[in-house]
Amino acid sequence: MNYEAVIGLEIHCELKTKTKIFCGCATGFGAEQNTHVCPVCLGLPGVLPTINKRVVEFAIKAGLATNCEINKYSKFDRKNYYYPDLPKNWQTSQYDLPICEHGWVDIDTSEGKKRVRLTRIHMEEDAGKLVHSGTTIKDSISSDVDYNRTGVPLLEIVSEPDMHTAEEARVYMEKIKAIMEYIDVSNCRMEEGNLRADVNVSIRPEGTTELGTRTEMKNINSFKSLEDAINYEIERQTEVLEDGGHIVQETRTYDADRGITLSMRSKENAHDYRYMPEPDLPPIITSDETIEKYRAELPELPDARRARYEKDYGLGDYDAAMITSTRAMAEYYDAVIATGADPKLAANWMMSDLSKKLNEEGITIEKSPVDAQRLGEMIQLIMKDTISGKIAKKVFTEMWTNPDAPEKIVKDKGLVQITDTGAIESAVDAAIAANPKAVAEYQGGKKKAIGALVGQVMKATKGKANPQMVNKMLVEKLK
Ligand code: ADP
Ligand code: ZN
Ligand code: MG
């Protein structure tokens, strides 16, 4: 039997507010243990939380950017559970009246465009962190509790079970990341856990619509782990069913080193949490005016920017999608164009040589040693025919380790294109004289043979002759 996978994601997104959600403590990452704490976030008795208005603003903006309806009456609830990193023994979260509901985002996969629905976005506080003396809780003699992260604001973005492949899930999470970066509500540093997903996976016989029993993998914080964990889980569940077994609804962990998922505990249900309204916080009432004010403050979002690049700059769909896939890429692109560089050339360079170098070195575009200004200047040298596209590749490689202006590099390295007819002519004559076979072939009708002659001229001029001029002159002379 063939099975279809069904996947739904709960993405936790840490908000970049200066202070925590219910107190004035700082949110900064990497501070000394238990220095960003106060009676409120430590859950001491007799203190009252107050809501950080920025958190509500960011949540509403996130909802608007993902086509959600904003609930004008929303409230907080207590989700009760016991764990040492949770000093109050409940997490202040939202249950039945989340701030945003019924959204969607469009994603592009190798199979085409597709829409993923969002069930809801709600606000909640993060828990603290256990710092084990060993590597895991099991092999540790003791564990410290660090409450710095307790009360850091989170959005939980819950999707409908609309995805069916690991790729769809990855692209969806990339899209959510891009949107949160564009609207500037989160740093989205996955390695720091700013963005992490609980991944729900089930399978069902192809062609059926009833949902199968799901397993959930918690706190996945890289795109690679996301895909690997899903693929592993689909395979595992398929094997269980094929062997006549049944899937147990449970929480599993993904062990990235071993590439497998492991059973952690049976899954808790909502009633296990004894959700109850939070009596210490007033409901959040939002007016149309406020919603419209936040809507007006939203920047251009990835889909709109992509459409604009296609329309205004004539970029292909794929290139426009790639360049707008992160805010940093789009901003880099705009900065290259702002120098006066041709938009299509700029896109080509970003998609080819620049991406390749960044991938090779495993760095993001913000850290590129060739910044937008210098790439723009280099592209203008191509536009002015100072260098050919081929020489530009050499210049670009040099620029990677040499901080000089491209114009200076071209001069210092003697890479200026030869457009002097006399100099090209002597190289052309020499190539014709030295290659009678290619000449004969060309004149006998094999037009492709000219390539060998062009190659000779380029070699003799160390790639600096203007290729169009060489071609033209050869055609003339061989008539
Ligand atoms: P929780 O996991 O906190 O109990 P929900 O029941 O709302 O919360 O489900 C959370 C996520 O699991 C959602 O993203 C939803 O789309 C997804 N999901 C629910 N049922 C299934 C299923 N049978 N297979 C795959 N994903 C599912
Ligand atoms: Zn505090
Ligand atoms: Mg869940």
Image (spheres, rainbow, N blue to C red):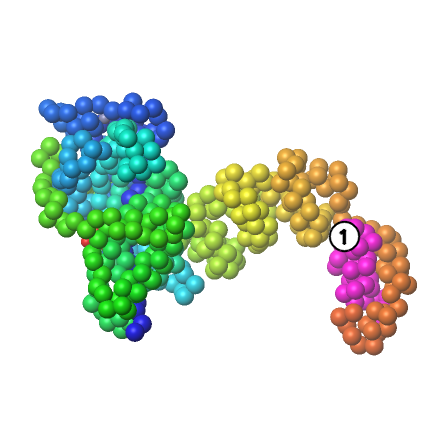
Q: Residue at x 81, y 63 (%)?
A: 453
- Figure check: 348 above or below 82: below
Q: Is residue 1 above or below residue 58?
A: below
Residue 451 sits inside the magenta stretch: yes
Residue at 89% over, 59% down: 430
Q: Nearer the viewer, residue 464 or 168?
A: 168
- Front in this rendered view, residue 393 or 343: 393
- Which picture quadrant has residue 190? top left
Which quadrant is home to the N terminus? bottom left
Q: Position of residue 150 (x, y in %)?
A: 24, 32
Name the image quarter holding residue 111: bottom left
Magenta part of the chain: 450-479
Q: Is residue 183 visible?
A: no
Q: Which amino acid, mark 1?
A: Gly
Left or right side of 363 for 185: left
Q: Which residue is mark 1?
A: 463
Q: Which residue: 25% across, 24% down?
A: 37
